C-alpha cells in the first residue's frame, strides 16, 4: 500500500492546518453570505504574490497588504452605497486577478509556475511552509475565538449589535482581514481558485449535523480535515492533482451528507 | 445632574438634504414607559438610533447616563436557517450568561417552552418573547423596542404590552417604545411623544389622542383612538394605576416648540392640551 513519505506527511499536516481554521471561518462566510468575498480575496491574492515577488518581500506580506486594501475599498465604497457590494467585489476580483497574472507574466527574473498559484501545490510544501501555515492558522483561530461573540451578534443582527455597543464596522473589518490571513496561509496548498471551496463546502456540509453555531464550526473543521485526508490519499493512489482532489473530496462529502444524516438518525436540525 | 436615562435636546439630523429630525427634545426616566408614535417615515427609528448613540445628530445634544446598559428589540429579526441558532443560544448573543440565568429570563417572558426551538422557525409572537428575554438578560437600564408587535395579533399585542408593564414595575427600568398604533400601547404607556420630524405633541396618552395635531397626522383613525383611549383610561382607574391624566405638563411636555399648529382643519376643542 501507500508508503508515508515525507512529502506526503508534510502535505497532510499542511492540509489539516488549513482545514482546521478554514472550517470555523467558513461558517461565518456561509452565514454572512460572503462566498463571493472569499473568492475575491483569493483572486486578489495573486496580485499580492506578484507584488511580494517584485518588492522582494515574502508573498504572505503581499497578500495581507492587498487584503487590507480590499477591506478598505469595500468598507469605504460600501458605505457610499452607489454600487451593490457584489458589483464592487466583481470589479476588484477580476481586476486584481488580471493584474496579478500580468505582473507574474512580465517578471523575467523570477520563473513562476502560474498553475501552482492557481491550483496549489500541496506536495511541494516545505518545513518552513508548515511553520507559516500552523503559525498563521493558529493566530487566525485565536482571533476568531476572541471575536466570536461580537461577530456572531453582528451576523445575526447588525442593528441589535450596534444598539448594544458592539463596534460593528470594526468587527466586520477584522473578520475580512482574518479571511485575508487564511487565504494567505492556504494559497500555497490549495491555490487561489480553490480556496473558497475549503471555506464554504465543509461549512455547508456541517450545517446538517449541527445544533449550534459553535457545533457547526467544530464539525466543519472536522469535515475539512476528512476531505484533506481523502483527497491526498486519492491523489497519491491515482496520481491526481492534489488540491483539486481535496476539493472534490469535500464536494463528495457534501453530496453524501444527506445519506449520512439519515444513517445517523439526524434530520435537518 | 441627569435624573434621566437618556436626554436629547434640540436634536436635528438631515440626510441628503432632507430633514429627518428637527429640534427634537426627548427624555426618559427610570421606571418610565415612553411611546413614540408617528406616521411612516416620521423619523421614529432615527430618533431612537440617536438616543442609543448609534447615529450622531447634526446638532443638538444627547446625554446618556454613564454606564447605561441598553437592551434593544429590533423591528424584525430574520435568522437564516443556515445558522443553527436555538432560542437558548440567541438570548446570550451579546452577553454571556449561565444556564440558570437564561432559564430565569425565559421564564420571565413566558418563553420557557421555546428554549430549544430553532430561531428560524419561530412565529411572530414567539420571536417577540425570545427577543425580549434576550434584551432582559443584559439587565438593561433602558429597554428600547422598535414596533415590537409587527405580525402579532391584537390579543398577543395586548398581552405583550401588559408584560412590558410588569417588567417595568419589577425591574424599574425605563422603556422606549416605537409604535404606529397608539391604541394598543395606550394601557402600558406613561407618556406619548408624537413625532413628525419634529415633536408635534406630547403628554399622557389620552391627551395626545385628543390633540388636533395628532388627529391631523393620523386622520380618520384618530377619532377611533380617542374612543379607545377613554376605555383604556377607565381600565386604568379600575386598576388604580398612577396615570397622570390631564395634568402632565411637567418638564416632559413638548408643546412649546415654535413650528407647528398651522393646520387649518377644524380643531376648536383642544388648545393643544394646554391648561
Image: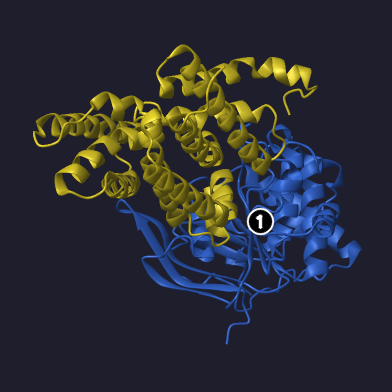
Asked whether residue A118 appears in the rendered view, the answer is yes
- Residue displayed at 40% across by 26% down: A194
Colour representing chain A: yellow
Relative vertical location of residue A5 with respect to residue A135 in this rendering, above or below: above
Residue nearer the viewer, A80 or B257: A80
Judging from the image, the colouring scheme is: by chain
User: Could you say which quadrant of the image residue B101 lies in?
Assistant: bottom right
Task: Report the chain holding disc 1.
Answer: B
Whole-percent x and y of residue A84?
Answer: 34, 34
Relative vertical location of residue B31 with respect to residue B138 in this rendering, above or below: below
- Residue displayed at 80% across by 62% down: B167
Q: Residue furthest right?
A: B238
Colour representing chain B: blue
Whole-percent x and y of residue A79?
Answer: 34, 48
Q: Secondary structure at mark 1?
A: helix
Whole-percent x and y of residue A206?
Answer: 63, 30
Crowd band around label 1 with a 10 angstrom C-alpha radius: few (<14), some (14–19), many (20+): many
Q: Quadrant of the N terminus of chain B?
A: bottom right
Q: Which residue is mark 1?
A: B209
Residue nearer the viewer, A15 or A248: A15
- Residue displayed at 40% across by 47% down: A132
Asked whether residue B264 appears in the rendered view, the answer is no
Say whether residue A217 is left or right of residue B59. Answer: right
Say whether residue A265 is left or right of residue B119. Answer: right
Label tally: 1
Residue nearer the viewer, B165 or A120: A120
Relative vertical location of residue A1 with respect to residue A113 in this rendering, above or below: above
- Residue displayed at 62% across by 77% down: B4
Amino acid at each position: 500500500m501507500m508508503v508515508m513519505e515525507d512529502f506526503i506527511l508534510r502535505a497532510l499536516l499542511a492540509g489539516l492546518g488549513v482545514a482546521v481554521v478554514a472550517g470555523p471561518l467558513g461558517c461565518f462566510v456561509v452565514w454572512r453570505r460572503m462566498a463571493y468575498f472569499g473568492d475575491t480575496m483569493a483572486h486578489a491574492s495573486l496580485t499580492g504574490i506578484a507584488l511580494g515577488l517584485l518588492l522582494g518581500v515574502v508573498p504572505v506580506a503581499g497578500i495581507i497588504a492587498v487584503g487590507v486594501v480590499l477591506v478598505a475599498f469595500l468598507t469605504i465604497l460600501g458605505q457610499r452605497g452607489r454600487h451593490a457590494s457584489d458589483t464592487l467585489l466583481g470589479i476588484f476580483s477580476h481586476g486584481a486577478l488580471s493584474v496579478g497574472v500580468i505582473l507574474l507574466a512580465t517578471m523575467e527574473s523570477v520563473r513562476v509556475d502560474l498553475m501552482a498559484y492557481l491550483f496549489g501545490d500541496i506536495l511541494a510544501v516545505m518545513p518552513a511552509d508548515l511553520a507559516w501555515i500552523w503559525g498563521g492558522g493558529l493566530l487566525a483561530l485565536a482571533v476568531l475565538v476572541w471575536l466570536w461573540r461580537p461577530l456572531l451578534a453582528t451576523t445575526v443582527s447588525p442593528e441589535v449589535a450596534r444598539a448594544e455597543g458592539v463596534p460593528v464596522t470594526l468587527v466586520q473589518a477584522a473578520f475580512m482581514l482574518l479571511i485575508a490571513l487564511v487565504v494567505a496561509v492556504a494559497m500555497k496548498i490549495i491555490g487561489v481558485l480553490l480556496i473558497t471551496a475549503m471555506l464554504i463546502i465543509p461549512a455547508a456540509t456541517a450545517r446538517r449535523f449541527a445544533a449550534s453555531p459553535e457545533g457547526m464550526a467544530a464539525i466543519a473543521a472536522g469535515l475539512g480535515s476528512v476531505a484533506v485526508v481523502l483527497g491526498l490519499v486519492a491523489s497519491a493512489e491515482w496520481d491526481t492533482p492534489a488540491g483539486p482532489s481535496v476539493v472534490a473530496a469535500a464536494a463528495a462529502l457534501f453530496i453524501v451528507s444527506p445519506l449520512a444524516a439519515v444513517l445517523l438518525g439526524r434530520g435537518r436540525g | 445632574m441627569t435624573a434621566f436615562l437618556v436626554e436629547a435636546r434640540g436634536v436635528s439630523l438631515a440626510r441628503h438634504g432632507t430633514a429627518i429630525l428637527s429640534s427634537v427634545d426627548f427624555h426618559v426616566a427610570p421606571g418610565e414607559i415612553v411611546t413614540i408614535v408617528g406616521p411612516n417615515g416620521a423619523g421614529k427609528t432615527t430618533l431612537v438610533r440617536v438616543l442609543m448613540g448609534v447615529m450622531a445628530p447634526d446638532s443638538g445634544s444627547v446625554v446618556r447616563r454613564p454606564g447605561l446598559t441598553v437592551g434593544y428589540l429590533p423591528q424584525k429579526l430574520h435568522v437564516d436557517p443556515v445558522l443553527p441558532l436555538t432560542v437558548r443560544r440567541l438570548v446570550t448573543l451579546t452577553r454571556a450568561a449561565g444556564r440558570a440565568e437564561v432559564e430565569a429570563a425565559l421564564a420571565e417572558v413566558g418563553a420557557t417552552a421555546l428554549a430549544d426551538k430553532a430561531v428560524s422557525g419561530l412565529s411572530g409572537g414567539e420571536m417577540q418573547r425570545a427577543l425580549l428575554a434576550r434584551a432582559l438578560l443584559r439587565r438593561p437600564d433602558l429597554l428600547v423596542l422598535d414596533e415590537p408587535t409587527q405580525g402579532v395579533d391584537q390579543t398577543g399585542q395586548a398581552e405583550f404590552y401588559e408584560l412590558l408593564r410588569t417588567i417595568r414595575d419589577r425591574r424599574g427600568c425605563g422603556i422606549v417604545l416605537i409604535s404606529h398604533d397608539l391604541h394598543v400601547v395606550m394601557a402600558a404607556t406613561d407618556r406619548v411623544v408624537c413625532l413628525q420630524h419634529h415633536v408635534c405633541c406630547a403628554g399622557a396618552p389620552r391627551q395626545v389622542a385628543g390633540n388636533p395635531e395628532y388627529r391631523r397626522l393620523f386622520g380618520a383613525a384618530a377619532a377611533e383612538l380617542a374612543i379607545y383611549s377613554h376605555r383604556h383610561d377607565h381600565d386604568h382607574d379600575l386598576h388604580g394605576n398612577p396615570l397622570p391624566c390631564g395634568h402632565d405638563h411637567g418638564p416632559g411636555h413638548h408643546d412649546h416648540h415654535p413650528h407647528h399648529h398651522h393646520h387649518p382643519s377644524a380643531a376648536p376643542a383642544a388648545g393643544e392640551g394646554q391648561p
